Amino acid sequence: MIVPRTLSDLKIWLKGHRAFQSRKWESVLTLLATRAYLFICAPNALVGFRVKLPADIAAAAVKKRIRPDKLPHLLDVRAANIELDKFSGKWSSLSDVTDRNNLAALDLSETSIALVGCGTIGSHLARMLVQCGAGNGGKLTLFDTQALDQGNIGRHLLGFGDIGKGKASAVGAELSRFHPQVKVASIEDDALRHLSEVGNHDLVIDATGEWNVQSALNQWFLDGGRKKARAILHSWVFMNGAGVQSFLNLNDEYACFRCLKPVFDGPWRFPVGNEKDELNLQPATCGDGAFVPFTVDAPVMAASLAVRAALDWVNGDPGPRLRSAVVDVRRGRAQEPRHPSPSKACPACADIRASR
Ligand SMILES: [Zn+2]
């Protein structure tokens, strides 16, 4: 293909294509007269043009000595001498940029996801989910009650410029900045007060790492108020970042989240660190809440485990429900991926299972 050099070349070139109807030439001229870009989109190419206005026409247009509605005709008359700037483009839709990396049959684009918690795990997880197709068709809703604090940004996706903003909204804005076609809703409130909305998603992801929220969402999922939700996926960091875990609950014959730690102050059945180590909880100080220190590697690994579990599930092969990874090789304790059996002592599901 010889790329047109002048407006006259472009006219001949377009009229040589069967898909182009000659009466459209007038609309092409009208478009180009406004200095807009014209892109020709074909499966194998994306070519763009813009006219270089001759100096005398440009000056006359600035001085309003040419009526704008006369400019297309003037361009047509002088088409052989009007050169074009030329551009090449690449398809960059959200599908184009996310599909290329996924070896599995399905990505997350057809799955609606409620992400509860946009903190240290949830913020990284939110962007990874989008990079795997979330928010591209399927609804993506973010929940968080808090605003981003300066103490958060050492391990959060967001940085200095977002301090003081609500985490859910700011992460949502970051996802829209990542790609303008991402469709995301942000709710700056406690997800437990919006369970009806949470349950309107195929997949609920709990990235809070907070025992009370984890337990409450687990109970809600078991109690059947979940409407559309078919799966709940928990993601957390263990013991000062010694390791990370993800757990997928499909409300079937395997364990629920509370089965993993049936007694509130008892041990985890499959710990990925030593619970007898001292939890280095930093007490609340003026302007900063209590927190458990660990570096950003831990939440990013937790988010990675959760993304893989979600992709396996949407592709029909959920695999081991409990997945663990050691982050700190000195403190972590390796756990094989497994399907935990229900605990007879589970306060959440033992009675429900007994009554089935
Ligand atoms: Zn249970």
Image (cartoon, grey):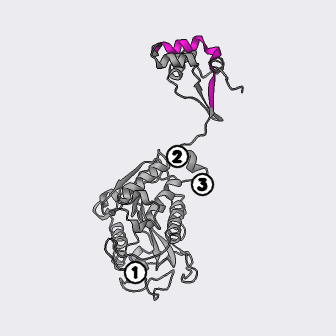
Farthest residue, direction bottom: 276
Crowdedness of circle 1 by 10 Å Cα count: few (<14), some, many (20+)? few
Q: Amino acid at mark 1?
A: Leu
Camera-nearest label, 1 or 3: 1
Q: Which sits earlier in the primary sequence, circle 1 or circle 2?
A: 2
Residue placed farthest to the right in the image? 2
Magenta: main secondary structure: helix
Q: Earlier in the sequence, mark 2 or mark 3?
A: 2
Q: Is mark 1 within 8 Å of ligand 1?
A: no
Does label 3 point to a residue whose CB lies under 8 Å from ligand 1?
no
Q: Is residue 7 left or right of residue 258?
A: right
Task: Single out the mark in the foreground, 2 or 3.
Answer: 2
The secondary structure type at the circle numbered 1 is loop
Q: Which residue is disc 1 drawn over?
A: 281
Q: Nearer the viewer, mark 1 or mark 2?
A: 1
What amino acid is labelled 2 in the image? Leu
State how far apart marks 1 and 3 are (Cα): 39 Å
Residue at (50, 19) in percent of width and height: 30
Q: Is residue 261 above or below residue 221?
A: below
Q: What range of the chain is rendered magenta?
A: 69-86
- Give the distance between the C-alpha atoms of the residues marked 1 and 2, in whole angstroms: 41 Å
- Is 73 inside the magenta-drawn segment? yes
The residue type indicated by label 3 comes to Asn
In the visual, does 199 lie left or right of 274?
A: left
Q: Toward which corner of the image does residue 123 lie, by quadrant? A: bottom left
Residue 233 visible from this viewpoint: no
Q: Quadrant of the N terminus?
A: top right
Mark 2 residue crowding within 10 angstroms, few (<14) / some (14–19) / many (20+)? many
Residue on which disc 2 sits = 94
Location of mark 3 (residue): 102
